[in-house]
Image (spheres, coloured by chain):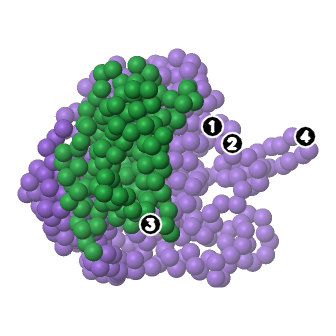
């Protein structure tokens, strides 16, 4: 399979060219910056919560195709979900990217995520795909534990 | 002129396919490949005379000690140093700079003093000073860049004052490719009794280094960037300076005598070479110097200049290319940084790699410079003696393919 078929699938390029939920939320409940120092991918994640439901989510991403597409898909996957459900999907996604033996397949609702499975074959790019998801997890965890170490600001 | 075909044959690694395509190695600014003779010098040491140095009376140890010290003399001649004890072997340029920061700066600078760097420095010539400034309360100033990516010396008189104690500058940028004329800087620095360190890590592959002509006080480079092995760098310093400095690392080899309650230090250069060094690689570094000298810097420069001109011309034909560095061959080496508008360097790097072309994509250990240029990174093609026009043509062809794979991205 060529690079084009495997890494730069149409789904990925579509999310890269037109990332969903791109931008910021003025009255965000939670906000966290994510950074991938090796390649300079940067994003800022904004969550608007209604109790524990993610009512709105936006990402300002400045990065490569994989990190931009992955963050776009992430916002689509978790918007409207409870924080617990969001954590579950994020964990499943990490499983798909990091677990060599098991193959994770997402169902129809999250079918786009399956497009990123090919990134697994390019180890240096896995970090790009994980950035948005790790930032989401840190953001939620930081909220739960009120962890001061995280740059987690409630606004 | 260089016989590139003949040179290529000396580098076994180049004779291979990557991703099913002939390997085109264009990441020489990161590290160069090694000729057979250097590889053999390493294995000869292990096969024939592996022994620790400086402390054995047996034949193998004497032979190893001699070979190790021969590299010191070869390096002395290579950079025009006055005495061989002015050459300190370190692991790399980074360690050399840390040595200056630790053993010179910490004992000679006081709060309020200033260190002058430039906006084009590698992290190796930034982070040790930033850490030191926290510790000592000294201030760091920077020589800025001009619009054509050169050092802007127009305000040098304000930047170098009697507060300036150390000036540490690169002789060649590993991103922009520019070669810096340091004459005015060293002159003014010395007028104010500041010491000057020259980071020659990138320059040494492209031009002869003469510490007398450079008129500096310290100079460092790594052998892995001039066809030599990894694990060996040097710090050169004026003998009186080095003599006045306390050791960096302590332990075996760097001592004169040790008692249970006190220790006296060995003389130069051993004072700065604690523990068993990277003997095999230091020995092989001499072979790298000989290889370079055999070809000669004159021919290296001619070849590089011609190839750089060719590359700049061919790359200029690529739509939407943005260069970070002069698009000419005046005072510049064969390091070419660029981006294609709308494509992230990592994506572009991946597409290029797929065609067997090794280039670097990223910040090149110059994050502050990237911020200054307002980019996340660049693609960097760096050429050396075994590269030819064919390699450039292949690189340019991969770029043509990039937009096809990635599509154009409107800037957000
Ligand atoms: C200009 C410059 N300075 C310093 C270094 C650091 O060299 P090393 O990693 O061998 O310590 C490099 C290497 O990339 C460089 O290009």
Pick whichever, A11 or B303, lies toward us.
Answer: A11
10 Å crowding of disc 1: few (<14), some (14-19), many (20+): some
| Mark found first going from the N terminus, 4 or 2 | 2
* Residue visible at 38% across and 33% down in the picture: A54
- Residue position for label 3: A103
- The x, y position of residue B375, in whole percent, is 27, 40
Disc 1 and disc 4 in contact, CB within 8 angstroms: no
Which of labels 1 and 3 is toward the front? 3
Looking at the image, residue B241 sits to the left or right of residue B23; the answer is right
Q: How far apart, in angstroms, are the residues tagged by discs 4 and 2?
A: 18 Å
Disc 2 and disc 1 in contact, CB within 8 angstroms: yes
On the same chain: label 4 and label 2? Answer: yes
Disc 4 and disc 2 in contact, CB within 8 angstroms: no
Task: Give the letter of the chain under mark 3.
Answer: A
- The x, y position of residue B280, in whole percent, is 60, 70
- Residue position for label 4: B261
Task: Give the letter of the chain under mark 2.
Answer: B
Question: Which label sits on residue B247?
Answer: 2
Q: Is residue A117 visible?
A: yes
Above or below residue B139? Residue B44 is below
* Residue visible at 34% across and 37% down in the picture: A80
Q: Secondary structure at mark 1?
A: helix
* Residue visible at 56% across and 42% down in the picture: B98
Chain that is coloured green in the picture? A
Question: Which label sits on residue B103?
Answer: 1
Q: Secondary structure at mark 2?
A: loop
For chain B, the rendered hue is: purple
- The x, y position of residue B231, in whole percent, is 55, 60
Task: Give the letter of the chain under mark 1.
Answer: B
- The x, y position of residue B234, in whole percent, is 53, 53
Above or below residue B182? Residue B379 is below
């Amino acid at each position: 399979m060529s690079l084009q078929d495997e890494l730069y699938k149409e789904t990925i390029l579509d999310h890269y060219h037109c990332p969903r939920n791109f931008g910021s939320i003025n009255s965000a409940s939670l906000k966290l910056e994510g950074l991938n120092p090796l390649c300079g991918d940067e994003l800022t994640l904004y969550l608007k919560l209604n109790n524990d439901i993610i009512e709105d989510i936006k990402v300002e991403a400045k990065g490569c195709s994989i990190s931009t597409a992955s963050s776009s898909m992430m916002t689509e996957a978790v918007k409207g979900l409870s924080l617990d459900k969001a954590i579950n999907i994020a964990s499943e996604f990490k499983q798909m990217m990091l677990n060599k033996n098991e193959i994770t397949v997402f169902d129809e609702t999250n079918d786009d995520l399956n497009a990123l499975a090919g990134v697994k074959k390019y180890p240096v790019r896995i970090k790009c795909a994980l950035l948005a998801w790790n930032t989401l997890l840190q953001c939620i965890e930081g909220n739960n534990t009120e962890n001061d170490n995280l740059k987690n600001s409630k606004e | 002129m260089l016989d590139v075909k003949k040179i290529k044959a000396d580098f076994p690694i180049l004779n291979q396919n990557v991703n099913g395509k002939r390997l085109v190695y264009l990441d020489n600014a990161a590290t160069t490949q090694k000729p057979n003779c250097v590889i053999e010098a390493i294995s000869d040491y292990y096969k024939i005379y592996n022994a620790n140095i400086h402390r054995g009376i047996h034949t193998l140890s004497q032979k190893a000690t001699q070979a190790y010290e021969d590299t010191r003399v070869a390096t002395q001649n290579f950079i025009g140093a006055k005495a061989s004890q002015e050459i300190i072997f370190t692991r790399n340029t980074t360690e050399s700079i840390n040595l200056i920061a630790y053993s010179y700066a910490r004992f000679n600078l006081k709060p309020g003093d200033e260190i002058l760097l430039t906006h084009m420095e590698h992290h190796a010539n930034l982070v040790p000073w930033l850490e030191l400034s926290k510790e000592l309360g000294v201030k760091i100033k920077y020589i800025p860049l001009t619009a054509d990516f050169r050092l802007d010396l127009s305000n040098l008189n304000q930047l170098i004052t009697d507060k300036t104690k150390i000036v540490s500058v690169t002789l060649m940028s590993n991103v922009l490719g520019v070669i810096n004329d340091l004459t005015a800087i060293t002159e003014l620095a010395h007028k104010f009794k500041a010491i000057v360190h020259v980071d020659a890590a990138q320059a040494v592959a492209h031009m002869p280094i003469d510490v007398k002509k450079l008129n500096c006080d310290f100079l460092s480079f790594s052998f892995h960037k001039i066809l030599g092995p990894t694990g060996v760098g040097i710090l050169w310093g004026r003998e009186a300076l080095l003599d006045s400095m306390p050791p960096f690392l302590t332990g075996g080899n760097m001592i004169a005598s040790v008692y249970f309650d006190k220790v006296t230090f060995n003389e130069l250069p051993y004072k700065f070479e604690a523990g068993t060094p990277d003997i095999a690689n230091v020995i092989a570094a001499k072979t790298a110097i000989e290889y370079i000298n055999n070809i000669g810097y004159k021919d290296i420069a001619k070849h590089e200049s011609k190839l750089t001109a060719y590359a700049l011309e061919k790359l200029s034909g690529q739509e939407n290319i943005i260069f970070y560095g002069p698009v000419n061959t005046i005072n510049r080496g064969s390091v070419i940084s660029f981006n294609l508008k709308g494509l992230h360097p990592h994506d572009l790097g991946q597409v290029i790699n797929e065609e067997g072309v090794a280039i670097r994509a990223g910040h090149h250990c110059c994050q502050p410079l990237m911020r200054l240029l307002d980019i996340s990174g660049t693609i960097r093609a760096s050429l050396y003696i075994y590269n030819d026009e064919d390699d450039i043509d292949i690189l340019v062809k991969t770029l043509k393919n990039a937009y096809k794979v990635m599509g154009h991205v409107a800037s957000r």
